[in-house]
Amino acid sequence: PGGPGNDASVLTKTKSKTQRPPMYKVMLLNDDYTPMEFVVHVLERFFGMSHAQAFDIMLTVHKKGLAVVGVFSFEVAETKVAQVMDFARRHQHPLQCTMEKEE
Ligand code: TYC
């Protein structure tokens, strides 16, 4: 007779067919000091872009201040951000990479 966990409450649960795992936008931020070629290299190396693609996105960041460079699961996004931030730090460039949950 009623209560959670009985057959009725299980059967009346609705399941959305459109639910998906949350995805995260990884973004690159502009600064005045990181060399353009370094940013292009980062996009090729960590985001699998062609040179032309990487150059295009780098210019977008340079002109607009930031750009989304990819959309990934939480774990992959976190790894990309960490890899870029570590690589930039090791080369002593102030390049910033961040992630944000997609709406
Ligand atoms: N603005 C930098 C320059 O003029 C180039 C740059 C592009 C830096 C993109 C960061 O995410 C960035 N050297």
Image (cartoon, rainbow, N blue to C red):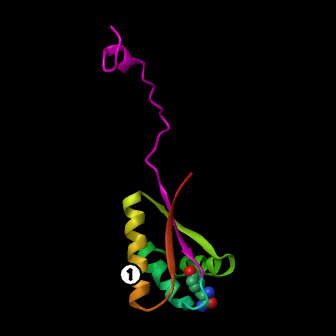
Which residue has dot 1 on it?
86
Q: Nearer the viewer, residue 69 or 65?
A: 65
36 is higher (above) or lower (below) than 19: below
Instruction: Residue at the far top: name it.
Output: 1
Residue in the image at 51% along x and 86% along y: 94
Asked whether residue 55 is in view, the answer is no
Q: Indicate if the residue with disc 1 has its beta carbon within 8 Å of ligand 1.
A: no
Q: Secondary structure at mark 1?
A: helix
Give the position of the N terminus as an image quadrant.
top left
Q: Which residue occupies 61% across, 89% down?
A: 32
Q: Residue at x 47, y 54 (%)?
A: 23
Highlighted magenta segment, given as a residue range: 1-30
Q: What is the tally of numbered marks visible in this picture? A: 1
Q: Is residue 95 above or below residue 4?
A: below
Percent coordinates x, y for residue 45 in the rendering: 42, 79
Is 64 situated above or below 31?
above
User: Is residue 33 among the parts visible in the rendering?
Assistant: yes
Q: What is the magenta segment's predominant secondary structure?
A: loop
Q: Residue furthest right?
A: 63
Q: Residue at x 50, y 70 (%)?
A: 98
Q: Position of residue 82 (x, y in %)?
A: 39, 73
Residue 24 highlighted magenta (yes or no): yes
Which quadrant does ligand 1 occupy?
A: bottom right
Residue 77, above or below 9: below
The answer to which quarter of the image holds residue 53 is: bottom right
Q: Position of residue 15 (x, y in %)?
A: 44, 29
Q: Residues within 10 Å of mark 1 (few under 14, many from 20)?
A: few
Query: Magenta stretch containing residue 8, yes or no?
Result: yes
What kind of residue is marked 1? Asp
